[in-house]
Amino acid sequence: MWCKWAIQRGHGIEETAAKLAEVSEQAQESIRVKDDHGYTLLTARKAAAAVDRERTHRQSVKSTVHPG
């Protein structure tokens, strides 16, 4: 959810992934225990895709609604 918030506010995927490593306990554990540095980037990419889907959906709904 934090990543979606960051992406919605205009932060880039790489920037969001880097900050996620700082603010997320789960991300920190994934890096520390599994040496998985791709976790944050994958999470940020998924968040960006979700934001894009939501924007596309909102735009399509707006274009189909006709004023009464």
Image (cartoon, grey):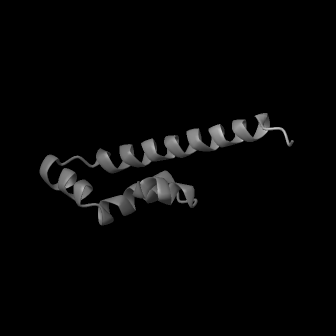
Residue 34 vs 26, above or below: the answer is above
21 vs 28, left or right, is: right
Residue 14 vs 19, above or below: the answer is above
**What x and y, as percent, mark residue 18?**
38, 59
57 vs 23, left or right, is: right
* Residue pictured at 83% horizontal, 38% vertical: 66
**What x and y, as percent, mark residue 40?**
34, 50
- Pick whichever, 35 or 67, lies toward us: 67
17 vs 62, left or right, is: left
**Quadrant of residue 62 within the rendered picture:** top right
**Quadrant of residue 65 within the rendered picture:** top right
Residue lying at the far front in this picture: please name it.
68
**What x and y, as percent, mark residue 67?**
86, 43
* Residue pictured at 35% horizontal, 59% vertical: 20
**What x and y, as percent, mark residue 17?**
39, 55
What is the quadrant of the N terminus in the image? bottom left
Number of numbered discs overlaid on the protein picture: 0
37 vs 14, left or right, is: left
* Residue pictured at 54% horizontal, 46% vertical: 51
Residue lying at the far bottom in this picture: please name it.
22
What is the quadrant of the C terminus in the image? top right
* Residue pictured at 23% horizontal, 61% vertical: 25
**Quadrant of residue 42 within the rendered picture:** top left
Residue lying at the far right in this picture: please name it.
68
- Pick whichever, 48 or 64, lies toward us: 64
Residue lying at the far left in this picture: please name it.
33
